[in-house]
Image (tube, rainbow, N blue to C red):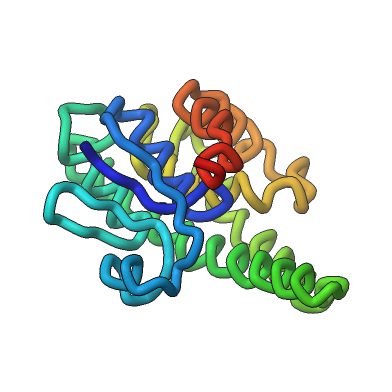
């Protein structure tokens, strides 16, 4: 049985999406205190997600999704070298060009919420501008006739890429990016993603 530590409003959702797409049995455990000694023994960084598979412990969401895709026969990993490279390309782009800005924005919103303050508009605005500037690359790629990031089939690259874009898209004028909007709608309409959205984090925390 695989164990994934962490709840949904985090990169844990990326891992849950992969688990659901692959149909792998797993249990999800919340982390009430990420600085507790028992959790730091799993991840000294004190962050989620953490995957435990027997005596194998793995951190970092993209590394986890890649590992999960090796555990069972599936269509999430392209078999040809060029499609696999495209999958890796857009995964790397999503982490460096989109997720960076998304993370900075989320951290500022959380900081402000904890302090009872309004988020710094300059920080949030800079993050949204950074994402808007970089989305054009993916828009052109998809508009060129690619149904998904690696070609015509849904892959791990779409999970890794769609996750941060889905989080920040509500704050962006997506009419500027019709190809991305269409692709994102198809990705997030998948039953696996819908099952992730249906997970009750409050019930996990109360268990």
Q: Is residue 135 visible?
A: yes
Q: How far from the left and from the top, in percent, is residue 183?
A: 56, 33
Front residue of 204/119: it is: 204
Q: Residue at x 16, y 27 (%)?
A: 73
Question: Which residue appears at 57% of the width and 29% of the height?
Answer: 198
Residue 148 coordinates in the image, percent (x, y): 44, 35
Q: Residue furthest front?
A: 207
124 vs 52: above or below: below
Q: Is residue 176 above or below residue 74?
A: below
| Residue 140 shows in this picture | no
- Is 174 left or right of 204, judged from the image as shown? right
What percent of the width, then of the height, locates residue 54?
A: 14, 48
In the rendered structure, the answer to whether residue 65 lies left or right of residue 174 reads: left
**Residue 114 picture quarter:** bottom right
Q: Horizontal placement of 78 versus 203: left or right?
A: left
Question: Quarter of the image containing the N terminus?
Answer: top left
**Pick the front one: 129 or 16:** 16
Residue 35 lies, in percent from the top left, at 44, 74
**Residue situated in front as seen by the camera: 29 or 110:** 29
Residue at the limit of the structure toward the top, as seen here: 191
Compared across the picture, whether 31 is left or right of 101 comes to: left
Q: Quadrant of residue 194?
A: top right
What residue is drawn where x is 70% and y is 68%? 110
The residue at the point 78 percent across, 73 percent down is: 112
Q: Is residue 72 above or below residue 95?
A: above
């Amino acid at each position: 049985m695989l164990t994934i530590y962490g709840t949904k409003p985090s990169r844990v959702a990326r891992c849950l999406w992969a688990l659901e797409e692959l149909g792998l049995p797993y249990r999800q455990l919340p982390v009430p205190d990420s600085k507790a000694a028992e959790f730091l023994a799993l991840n000294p960084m004190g962050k989620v997600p953490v995957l435990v598979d027997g005596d194998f412990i793995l951190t970092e969401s993209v590394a986890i999704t890649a590992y999960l895709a090796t555990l069972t026969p599936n269509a999430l990993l392209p078999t040809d070298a060029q499609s696999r490279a495209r999958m890796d390309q857009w995964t790397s782009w999503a982490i460096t060009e989109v997720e960076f800005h998304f993370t900075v924005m989320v951290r500022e919103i959380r900081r402000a919420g904890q302090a009872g303050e309004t988020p710094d508009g300059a920080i949030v605005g800079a993050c949204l501008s950074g994402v808007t500037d970089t989305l054009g690359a993916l828009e052109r790629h998809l508009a060129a006739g690619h149904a998904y990031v690696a070609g015509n089939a849904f892959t791990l690259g779409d999970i890794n890429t769609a996750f941060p874009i889905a989080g920040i898209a509500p704050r962006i004028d997506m009419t500027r990016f019709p190809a991305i909007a269409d692709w994102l709608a198809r990705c997030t309409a998948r039953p696996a993603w819908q099952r992730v959205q249906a997970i009750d984090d409050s019930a996990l925390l109360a268990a």
